Amino acid sequence: MLRIFIFACIFFLAACTASEISKTETSQYRFSKIVNTEQDSLANQTILPYKTKLDESMNSVLGKTDRAMVKDMPEGLLGNLVADIILYEANIHYKSDDGHGVDFCLLNNGGLRASLPHGEITRGKIFELMPFENEMIVLELNGETTLELIDFIAEKGGMPVSGIRFEIENQKPTNITINGKAFDKNKTYKVVTSDYLAHGGDKLAMLKKRLNDKLTGVKIRDAIIEYFVEQNNKGVTITSSLDGRIKYAH
């Protein structure tokens, strides 16, 4: 296990600082039930420089939040924030062939693995929030499939979304708007999501019926980090709110 950790540290840091590391050397040490203090010490010396760099990277502050953010349904502060970020970042990185940008974002609560605290947010916190290597992908859906997707979200009781609003009544969506305009079943829409969901994850089989798709080349985690750094450079504190994008009809 220790040898695996050594190689993991080397691989991670080589990827993060490829421009700085031109050569790596590794040595193998045999481990048994018999304690070998000399070899353990050598292993620790090997790991330490990489662990130090890894800790520095993970502990670096990317930005600040004005409140703690957690998951909830039908909408939550954390889900709203991350969905808003991904929609924003998708419209930066997505290269449209037809001049039509991304209409809305869909994520899943299961993909958000940790809450965000109030105050300073480190790179490590974003890795805890989004530990997966999922990439942003833009899908083009016809109106029928889009409605099937919205029906699924309503039946489930809500999911993290951005750019779309509706009410849930008897597990069905009503008063649907996308990009501030009434939903039109005769139109096509573009949704940004994770490649995991795009391939039918979380029972979203209808997404396989997409007309087209295009990977952005950007991981969801990296998009979140990019947004936090950008806002921090502007002196902006990250916030989120419950704005009724998905709510139950009265």
Image (tube, helix red, strand yellow):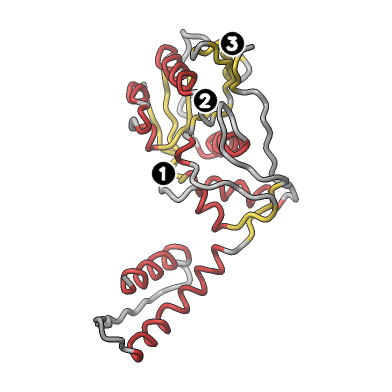
Distance from Cα at disc 2 to Cα at disc 1? 21 Å
Q: Describe the element under mark 1 as helix, strand or loop.
A: loop
Separation of disc 3 and disc 1 at Cα? 31 Å
- The location of residue 229, given as percent across then percent down, is 63, 52
Which quarter of the picture shows residue 110?
Answer: top left
Alpha carbon separation for disc pair 3 and 2: 15 Å
Q: Amino acid at mark 2?
A: Gly
* Label 2, residues with CA under 10 Å away: few <14, some 14-19, many ≥20: many
Q: Which residue is mark 1?
A: 134
Residue at the far right in the pictured view: 235
**Mark 3 falls on what kind of element?**
strand
Residue tagged by mark 3? 175
Look at mark 2 in the image and give the residue it sits on.
158
- Quadrant (top left, top right, bottom left, bottom right) of the C terminus: top right
Q: Give the residue at x 39% y 37%.
A: 195
- 151 and 72: which is toward the camera: 72
User: Mark 3: few, some, or many residues within 10 Å (few <14, many ≥20)?
Assistant: few
Q: Relative to 97, is 131 above or below?
A: below
Instruction: Please name the amino acid that badge 3 sits on.
Output: Asn
Kindly identify the residue that appears in the image at 54 percent across and 11 percent down. Answer: 169
Frontmost of labels 3 and 1 is: 3
